[in-house]
Structure formats: C-alpha cells, structure tokens
Image: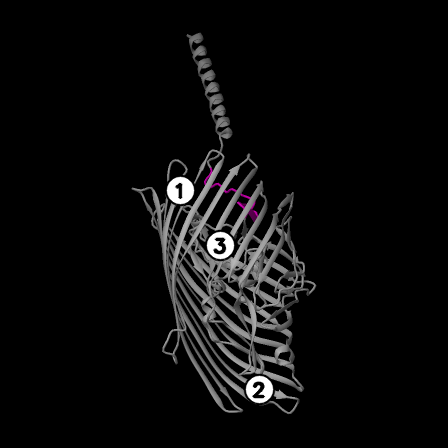
Amino acid sequence: MKLYKMALIAILLVSQVTLSQEKEKEKEKEKEKPEELKEVVIEKETKTFTYKNGNIKVDVANSVFNTAPSTLDLLAKLPKIQITPEKDGISVIGKGTPLLYIDNQSVDMNEFNALAVEDIKTIEIINNPSSKYEANGRVVILITRKFSKKEGYKVVLSENASFKRYFNNYAGINASFKTGKLEFKSNFNYNNITVWESNGNDLTLPDYDIRSNYLVTAVTKRPQFLYGGGLFYKINEDDYLTLNCSRKSQDDIFDITTNTFNQEQSTINYINTLNRNDEYRNFTNGFLNYNHKITSLDANLFSGFQYSNFNQQMASVIFNDYNDTGAELSQLRDQKFQVAVFSGRTDLEKKFKNEMNLELGALYLAADADTHFTIENINPVSTTKSDYDYKEKNIAAYSQLSGSFKKFNFMVGLRSENTIVRGKYASESTLTIDKNYINLFPKAQVGMTIDSTNTISMNYAKSIVRPNFSSTSQVSAYINPYFVWANNINLNPTITDEISLDYAHDDKTVRLTFFKTKNPVYYGASYSESQEVLTFMTTNFERESGIALEFILPFKYKFWSTTNVVNFGYTKIEDSAALTMETKPSVYMYTNHLFSLPKEIEVSLTCWGYTKQKLGIFERSGLITFDAAVTKKFFKVLDCALSWSDIFRMMNYRADFTINNVAARGIYYTDSSVISLSVKYSFGKIKKSEFKERSIDENSGRIN
C-alpha cells in the first residue's frame, strides 16, 4: 500500500513538472510569434523630379518648391519654363506658349494665378500631349492638386516674407477636412505686394526723321486676396464628384514715370511723364467634375463644366512736363474690360483585353468679352470713346486609339475644332471680325522597346495657339506722348507642325525636334503719322521654323540628386515687313542640385541661362541666374525655408528688332533678386480611414 501511494505521488509530481514544462514551451512559442500590427507605415523616398517618355514631373508638395510665394514664382524655378518680363505670360523652351491644365480642366493665366501653392501636389511638363488635350499648344503644363486619403482635419498656416527692392508679404491659411467619402478644402491668402518694373528703348524712324529714347519705371502697390473652397465626394471605388470655386481680387495703385528724349527733324523735346493709375481686378472661377465607371462597357466616362469671369477697371491721370516748363494735365483715361467663359467637356475611355485603348471626347466653349475705352485730351480738348464686343465659340471632338504589340507601341489621334468668332465696335454697323473655320489636328506616335532600359519613339503633331481673350481688351499703357503699349484685337491663330524623335535610356532622354509655324505672335511696332504715336503691340509674323536637340540628364548619388537640361536650338522668324538679320544657334541650360542632409535638412542649388539669341528678326542678349534654398522641418509640424533667387542680379536683358522700318533697341530690367523666409505650421487630427481609395490625382493622368 505504501508503495502504491509513493508511486501515485511520483506520477503526480512528474505530471506537474511535465505540465509546467509544456506551459513554459507554450509561452516561448507565444513570444516567438510575430505581434499583430495595427497599422503599417511604409516610408518611401520621394523624388522631386521624375521622368517618363520625355516628360518631367515635379513633386511640389514634398520639396523645396512648396515654399514659393506664388504659383508664378514656382513655375519660374522649373526646368525649361520662362516667365515674360511683364509676368503675364509663360513659355517653354523649344515649345512656345503652353496649354495650362489644373486636374482635368484647361485654364488660363488668371485661373492659374488664383491657385495657392499649398494646394499643388505635382506639376508635369508634357512634351507630346495626346488628342484629349485641346490642340491649343505644343506642350502641356499639368497641375495636380492634393487630396487626402486619411480621415480627420488639417490646417496649414503659412507666412512668406520676401525682400526685393521693396518688402513683400504673403500670408495664408489652408484647411482640409475628410470624413468617409467626403472631403472639404478651403484656402484664404492675403498678399501685400509692391512690384517694381522698368524698361527702356532707343527708337529710330528714318522715314519720318525721328529719333527717340525713353526709360520708364513703374512701382505698383498691390493688396491681393485669394480665397476658395472645394468638395470631393467619392461615390464608390470608381465614381467621384468634385466641385471647386476660387476668386482673386486685387487693387493696383501705381505710378508710371517716364523720362523721354524725342527729336523729330530739328525739333527736340525732353519730356517727363507721370501716369497715375488706379486699377481694380477680380477673377472668379468654378469647376464641376464627375467621373463614372460604366460597368457594362468596362469604360470610364468623365464630364466636366467650368465657368470663369474676369473684370478689370482702370482710371489714369496723365501729366507731361516739356523741357522743364512744369507738369501739366495732359490726358484722362477710363478703361474697362470684362470677359466670361463657359466650357463643358466629356471624355470616354475604353480599354480592351488586347492592350488596345480607345478614347473619344467632345468639348464646347463660349466666351463673351466687352471692352470700354474713353480718352479725354486736355489740350487741345477732345474725347475718344470706343466700345467693342467680342464673342467666340469653339466646338471640338476627338478620337484616339493606342496600343502595343510585342516590342512596339503606337498612338494615333485626330481632333476636329470648329471656331466661330465675331467682333464688333458699337459705333460700326458691320463686323470687324467675322471668322468661321474648321481645323483638323492629327497626332501620331510609334515607339519601340529595345530592351529593359532603352526605348525609341517618333512623334508627329499639328497644333494651334489662339489669341488670349485678354488680347480683345483695348486697355493700353501710356508711356509718353509719342509711345504706347497696346493689345491687338485682330490676331490670327498660330498653326504649328512638329515632328520629334526621342531616345530614352532609363531616366535619361535625348530628343531631336523640327517644327514649322504659320502666323507666330511676337511684339511688333507701327507708327501712326496722323496721331504721331508709335505703338508696340502683339503682331502676327509670317512664319517661324526651327530645329532643336535636347538632353534631359538626371543623376543621383547617395544624398545628392541633380536634374540637368541642355537644349541646342536654331530658330528663324521671318516677315516681309521686318528686317531679317543673321540667324545663329543658341544654347539653353538648366541644372538643379538637391542635397538631402541629416535632420531633415534639404539644400537646393539652381542655375539656368541661355546664350545670345539671333532669331532672324529678333536679337536678344544672353543671361544667366543662380538660385539657392535651404529647408528644415522642426517638430514634424513646422517647415522653414530660406531662399535667395537671382543671387548676382543678372536677369536684365536686351532685345533688338526692326519692323515696319522702326528700329528698336530695348533693355528690360527685372526685380527678380529676392531673399525669402518662409514658415509653414500645420496642425490637425488625422486618423486611419477604413475606406479604400485610389489616388484621385492619378485620374488626371487618364487624359494623357
């Protein structure tokens, strides 16, 4: 019995030990099991510049470019993009005036300037735009706005202090709120700007024995408001609705002072002119976009509507002082201009299983512009009044087929546009402008993949550049009693045929381009003997042709990345009314260097410039400029940036031409040397969203 009890106790002890050991093993296994993750955060290195098919895409939201005080200042820092001295136009090296797009809608300069930098996600320079884009241009600048993927709210307070010849201040607040399928965004910006401008010309008119030169300077005080809001509603995985409205308003109070020497035969005058101006501008713009997936057809349908309105009113009081005899009131001016534009578009995209893609679409645009112009001359007393009404309609349709077969890919598209234009002065019974024309714009591309790193492609495109609606304005700038800057209401559209050959190795591209243009638009000069006034205005020239060889060469090594663009171009502009001078090749160069340093410090160094340009009719001096910027993030919520543009003040340039036997030798001064301090503070509550969402910004790429 004792043995039995002892055996039973031993068995119990062994069982306890075994059970204890098994529990320990289970605990060890539990420790070895990976912990269940509540959320996965993937940190991905963002590239400021990316390259595909010869296009350049810039990540604005996550780079030093996000610190620019305005959208125009931002564009001026990007490769190949040039801003006109008057800050009212954009051109792309080797391509001319670009077509501007915000998401899925075409916009003009007013709509572009009303956009806050904080709202921009990316900017892409598309060198070979498809038929989905309007045929109005050889290159597209596509701006994609930000949308949030996480629920919650975020507020960004920004302040930019810029030191130029005068102090400029840019302050703004941007807010976004997202819950479920609905996102709301709003912004309010107040800019207190002082703009300095200056230019001069030596003018010779041998037919009238006139020699004149002037130096003009304008200083503008510009309080400016930009505000707007938008809604984004995700209906389901493929369908969405967006609504955006924005407005920009500004008062421009500026004096234009001009010192003039004028000699007509033996009569010599020295004139000091003071032109006091009070101007008000406002611009309102609205978008409504709807995207729908047609499940039965496995196709995507996009529809968009847009309305914009621009209003400008300017009153001028002009004094002239002849030969230091005292300033006398010379002229009163009252100028008004308004333009309203409505447009609607629809795009259908169908992808087939055999890698074929069919795209169809249509667009309707209607514009109505009115301009009122009144001049009262004091001595002798006279009054001139002019009312002009301009209406334009544009109806377009396009189709495009693209696909691939083995190593080859292709794209062929055709766009048809019917343009109807009517222009009439109120004092006349007949139309000044009466145009109704249809243009066909074919586009084609064929490419071949040589291997995983090398591709080659050939492109052909026909495009048009129509006059801006602002060109219908009769608003002009009085410089002195003998000279004015004015618009030209009789401009014809510019038609361009272009063929290019591209070779790409990884992210490096070489492009050879040839183009031929009819009716290119540049500034010209004409003299009115009856009014004794010389006018500079935009003018159609007969033809332009050119060839360009371009290299896009990005490199990266550890914390250093660089983007380099070199363009060798030969352009000739011709017109029977102009003196054709020597034509020579020129070189454009852009290089940007980004250094990603520890502790979230980023340094940017940029240099760009071009050599002397001899374009047949025009001869322009070369220039070069250097920019630098340093950014640093503090406490994950405070972004600070210090930048210096045009460090060595080298942005002044000369431009010479002879047109209608008027010889002009001009110099243009810029106020582009800027030291800026930018601060952005963000706060909010962002939480994980269970709603799965594709990047809405990528939907804008569907129209590539």
> In the rendered structure, which amino acid carries the disc numbered 3?
Leu
Horizontal and vertical percent for residue 80? 59, 55
- Residue 48 in view in this figure: no
Q: Image quadrant of residue 73?
A: bottom right
Q: Is residue 553 above or below residue 371?
A: above
Q: Position of residue 370 (x, y in %)?
A: 40, 74
Label 2 CA crowd tier, 10 Å (few <14, some 14–19, many 20+):
many
Range of residues picked out in magenta: 37-54
Q: Residue furthest right?
A: 648
Q: What element does badge 3 sit on?
A: strand
For marks 2 and 1, give the CA distance: 64 Å
The mark that comes first in sequence, 3 or 2, is: 3
Q: Is residue 683 visible?
A: yes
Depth check: give the residue in front, 125 or 249.
Answer: 125
Q: Calculate the distance from the C-alpha at mark 3 to the C-alpha at mark 2.
A: 45 Å
Q: Give the residue pinned by disc 2.
A: 319
Q: Badges 2 and 1: C-beta atoms under 8 Å apart?
A: no
Question: At x 53% / y 69%, what residue is drawn?
Answer: 538
| Residue on which disc 3 sits | 142
Q: As drawn, which residue projects farthest toward the left? A: 296
Q: Locate residue 38, reporting x and y percent.
A: 45, 40
Q: What is the three-letter code of the residue carrying label 2? A: Phe
